[in-house]
Image (tube, rainbow, N blue to C red):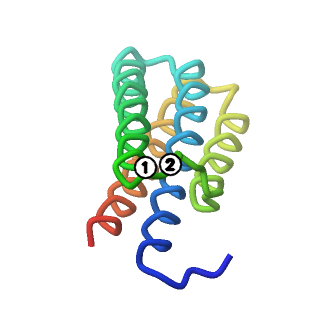
Amino acid sequence: MAISTMQAMLLNEIGDIYDAEHQFLEGQQKMLAAATLPKLQKMITEHIAQTEQHIRNLEQVFQLLGETPKRVPCAGAKGLVSEAAKLLSETAGSPEICDYAIGGAADKVEHYEILSYKGLIA
């Protein structure tokens, strides 16, 4: 679909991060199940709660704009989630390495989210 107005661009970008947050939530739930370090488990649990709040916030944004929440497929999130899943399977035999892989994947997601929201603000 061609984006020909700033409103359409905004809705597209909100839909993109809305999809990303849903994908990240599913990925975080898998990471939580694989994590062994209590500190890491706590961090993921807190981030799951934040992600759920982000989703609710985005739904409010859609409502404020008079729109129905709509996920626009986010290829960036799909790549990050699939990369994390691959690392989880490759490190499954070593809990310590798996925990470090999870931490790295979580950092990548956090940076992606920050940049996405900064882009929306701009």
Could you say where residue 73 lies in the image, as x and y percent from the top left? 65, 57
Question: Depth check: 56 or 51 in front?
Answer: 56
Could you say where residue 95 lies in the image, as x and y percent from the top left? 57, 23
Q: Nearer the viewer, mark 1 or mark 2?
A: 1
Which mark sits nearer the N-terminus, 1 or 2?
2
SS at badge 2: helix
Could you say where residue 59 lies in the image, as x and y percent from the top left? 43, 41
- Relative vertical location of residue 40 with respect to residue 10 in this rendering, above or below: above
* Dot label at residue 113: none
Quadrant including the N terminus: bottom right
Mark 1 and mark 2 residues within 8 Å of each other at the beta carbon: yes
Give left or right: position of 39 versus 91.
left
Question: Depth check: 119 or 61 in front?
Answer: 61
Residue annotated with mark 1: 62
Q: Residues within 10 Å of mark 2 (few under 14, many from 20)?
A: many
Question: Depth check: 36 or 20 in front?
Answer: 20
Type of residue at label 2?
Tyr
Could you say where residue 67 lies in the image, as x and y percent from the top left? 48, 52
Q: Residue at x 45, y 58 (%)?
A: 14
SS at badge 1: helix
* Dot label at residue 18: 2
Q: Residue at x 53, y 46 (%)?
A: 68
Task: Identify the image quadrant of residue 111.
Answer: bottom left
- Relative vertical location of residue 26 with respect to residue 72 in this rendering, above or below: above
Question: Depth check: 74 or 81 in front?
Answer: 74
Task: Identify the image quadrant of residue 79.
Answer: bottom right
Q: Residue at x 43, y 38 (%)?
A: 55
Type of residue at label 1?
Phe
Residue at mark 1 to residue at mark 2: CA–CA distance = 10 Å
Quadrant including the C terminus: bottom left
Total marks in image: 2
Task: Identify the image quadrant of residue 84.
Answer: top right
